[in-house]
Amino acid sequence: MTSSTATRLLDWYDRHARDLPWRIPPGSDAAADPYRVWLSEVMLQQTTVAAVKPYFEKFTATWPTVEALAAAPEEDVMAAWAGLGYYSRARNLVKAARAVADRGGFPDTEAGLRELPGLGAYTAAAVAAIAFGRRAVVVDANVERVISRLFDIREPLPASRKAIRAAADTITPETRAGDFAQAMMDLGSSICTARAPKCLLCPLREDCAGYAAGEPEALPFKPPKKARPVRQGCAYWMERDGKVLLVTRQGTGMLGGMRALPDDGWSAKGDGSTEPPVAGEWHPRGTVTHGFTHFTVELAVQELSGKAPTTPKGEWWPVAEIEDAGLPTLFAKAARLVLASR
DNA sequence: TATTCGTGGGA
DNA sequence: TTCCCAAGAAT
């Protein structure tokens, strides 16, 4: 491996860069907008490009600048994020936008960016490189895979992270670090894929120690996955005057900050109590199964017959507009189940 | 270092 | 169908 690896990759990127809504094409004179770079990078954390695109378009249309986003009510941002997952990103997005607006713009260094909520080592490096042209070592899951193969790093993750970063540092160029980072990610998504890498199309094949060693597709080595437990829970649908009771989930835990149906306290740690929020005649409307990263929940959905009391705490939302409530997917499924039973 | 955070698509 | 995975961060 030599610095020519970076040159080969950048030459490939100049010809094959994906056209993405948040990306400035290589060779363009246009300046990157730090707001759009930051927003896209946060959305892309653990999330596919295809899933992000419509959300990116919606967010930038609704809030074209970081100042506009900073001025938005948090609940509006949370509702707009609904369905994209990992909702701590949306909570931190609002905090970071307000911090940036207060200080009069984005920090333009990796260390400065790293101080913003929701920006870890990866995102701070990526924004510094892509938006501000800083040389930064940008390591995401794509880069971990590409570097593990390129250098034939056979130590398993996560212990290999230090060696991966050091190796990535040696091939990161002084200039065009942002294009280099995006090129690594494009290569990882289209050529150096997790399964069945297309080595015969790879611009770095001659540099690749993993290819030379014979089984690049086996890298990086990863520890085995743990089994996902299945939890049981209940969600409750009650109406009065054409409106359904919604709650806002508190705290920073599962679905924190999101609107939801009242439930019986199920969690990753255990089953719910099956205790409804108010006494009355409850009817089962079916069950929705939803897989989270570390557990699956089987959610029994029940509906109260008759008119709900005003006593329970929450927000009465028009049933006809339930799709606009910003429910995370689990509760959106539950709502559709109830409405489909009519 | 290990765990806890969503979701939808592809093999 | 089931499993794996995707531009990770916070604790």
Image (cartoon, coloured by chain):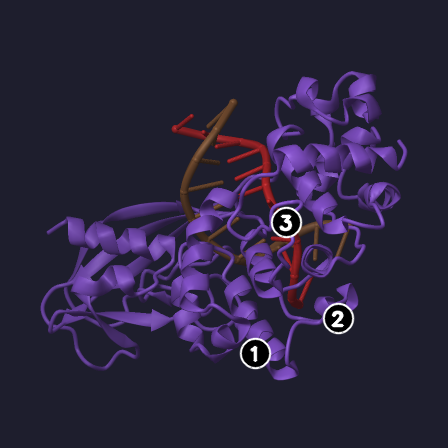
Chain colours: A purple, B brown, C red
Q: Residue A13 placed where, x, y %? A: 68, 37
Residue A224 visible? The answer is no
Q: Chain of mark 1?
A: A
**C-alpha separation, residue under disc 3 versus residue under disc 1:** 30 Å
A178 lies left or right of A49: right
Check disc 2 and report its element: helix, strand or loop: helix
Q: Could you tell me which residue is drawn at 17 percent across and 54 percent down?
A: A339
Tag nearer the camera, 3 or 1? 3
Residue sitting at x 12%, y 69%: A242
When asked about the image quadrant of residue A96, the answer is bottom right
Of pointers 1 and 2, the one earlier in the residue sequence:
1
Q: Eyeballing the image, is A143 above or below A330?
A: above
Q: Where is the N terminus of chain A found, in terms of image quarters? A: top right
The picture places residue A302, in percent across and down from the top left corner, at 22, 57
* The quadrant where residue A272 appears: bottom left
Amino acid at dot 3: Ser
Using the image as rendered, state which of residue A192 and residue A338 is in the foreground.
Answer: A192
Q: Which residue is mark 1?
A: A98
Any mark on residue A28, and which?
3
Q: Which element is circle 1 on?
A: helix
Nearest the camera: A296 or A16?
A16
For label 2, the residue is A112
Question: Do discs 3 and 1 share a chain?
Answer: yes
What residue is at 56 percent from the left and 56 percent from the top? A40
Q: Are marks 2 and 3 on the same chain?
A: yes
Could you tell me which secondary element the residue under label 3 belongs to?
loop
Residue A39 vs residue A21, the one in the foreground: A21
Q: Is residue A331 above or below residue A112?
A: above
Q: Is residue A4 left or right of residue A281?
A: right
First along the sequence among labels 2 and 3? 3
